[in-house]
Amino acid sequence: MEEETLLEQGYRKYRGADVDIYFNTNICAHSGNCVKGNAELFNLDRKPWIMPDNVPKEAAKRVIHTCPSGALQYIEK
């Protein structure tokens, strides 16, 4: 998906060096797959709660693919 489309659909962008991560709170099913999948990348106790540069790009992609609602998306650079 293209960035413009994601932003128009209500996703918020979290910039990283190798990958940008997009999150849409309105469609999140709160399964917890993200925070359980990688606490270095997704941590609800900090701001911003998503930090793409904390993990390798492939690790981020793996966790995002486990999101059942589609609330998490990414665009590789």
Image (tube, rainbow, N blue to C red):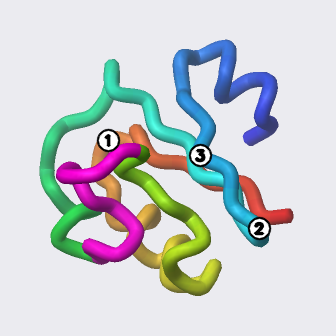
The segment highlighted magenta reads 38-47
**Mark 3 Cα-neighbour bin, 10 Å: few <14, some 14–19, many ≥20:** some
In the image, what residue occupies the spot 35% across and 49% down? 49
Under circle 3, the secondary element is: strand
Marks 2 and 1, the one that precedes in the sequence: 2
Vertical placement of residue 37 versus 22, above or below: below
Q: Position of residue 43 (x, y in %)?
A: 26, 59
Residue 33 or residue 14, whichever sits in front: 14
Q: Amino acid at mark 2?
A: Ala
Marks 3 and 1, Cα distance to the nearest angstrom?
A: 18 Å
Q: Which residue is mark 3?
A: 14
- Position of 14 with respect to 72 (left or right) is right
Task: Report the predominant secondary structure element of the magenta stretch.
Answer: loop
> Label for residue 17?
2
**What is the quadrant of residue 76 in the picture?**
bottom right
- Position of 11 with respect to 38 (left or right) is right
Under circle 1, the secondary element is: loop
Q: Position of residue 16 (x, y in %)?
A: 69, 61
Q: Amino acid at mark 3?
A: Tyr
- Position of 21 with respect to 48 (left or right) is right
Under circle 2, the secondary element is: loop
Q: Which residue is mark 1?
A: 69
**What is the quadrant of residue 29 in the picture?**
top left
